[in-house]
Image (tube, rainbow, N blue to C red):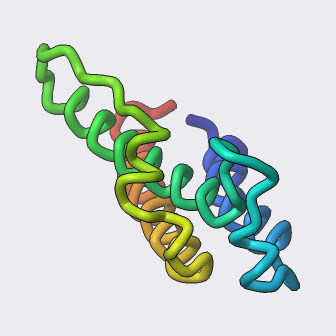
Amino acid sequence: MSSTQLKDYLNTHRQLVQATDGLTEEQLKWKSGPGIWSVTEVLAHLADHSIVVSFRIRDILAGTTAQLPAFNQDAWVSGQYANDGNAADILELFRSLLHYNSLLLSRLRLRTGS
């Protein structure tokens, strides 16, 4: 991953903060219809995805040969009552995961020279 790609990766959090800045709780939790995610649920999905990717990166680096299972994103979002969550808390988790993964990716760049 190039330094530009790493910066873009880290910039994802800022873009999400900017996109949600000024939205009320009602707007963050509003759903246009059944089965459609709210903004809060989309943020939770992005955080969940970052958790899964974090695990998968480390599993690959460990040389694990087990097939990694897919995750049912809709069941994860509904099963954890994501819309009852707080967007700021979800964004903070997302930022932390991005930062932690960027440290790993930076170490890998230093080791591999790419």
Q: Quadrant of the N terminus?
A: top right
Say whether residue 93 is left or right of residue 21. left
Q: Nearer the viewer, residue 43 or 36?
A: 36
Quadrant housing residue 29: bottom right
User: What residue sits 62% from the left and 38% below the top?
Assistant: 2
Q: Nearest the camera: 52 or 2?
A: 52
Residue 52 x %, y %:
35, 42
Q: Is residue 12 left or right of residue 49?
A: right
Which residue is outermost to the front? 34
Q: How many marks?
A: 0
In the rendered image, the vertical position of residue 48 relative to residue 20, given as above or below: above
Residue nearest the observer in this picture, 89 or 55: 89
Give the residue displayed 37% in from the left and 60% down from the top: 80
Name the residue at 76% across, 48% down. 33
Above or below: residue 74 compared with residue 99: above
Task: Name the residue located 46 percent from the left edge and 45 percent from the top edge.
Answer: 49
Rendering coords of residue 114 (x, y %): 51, 31
**For this view, does 46 lie left or right of residue 4?**
left
Q: Is residue 96 visible?
A: yes
Q: Quadrant of residue 110?
A: top left
Q: Is residue 70 left or right of residue 18?
A: left
Residue 12, how many percent across, how many down? 69, 57
The one nearer the camera, 70 or 65, is 70
Q: Position of residue 34 (x, y in %)?
A: 67, 46
Residue 106 visible within the image: no
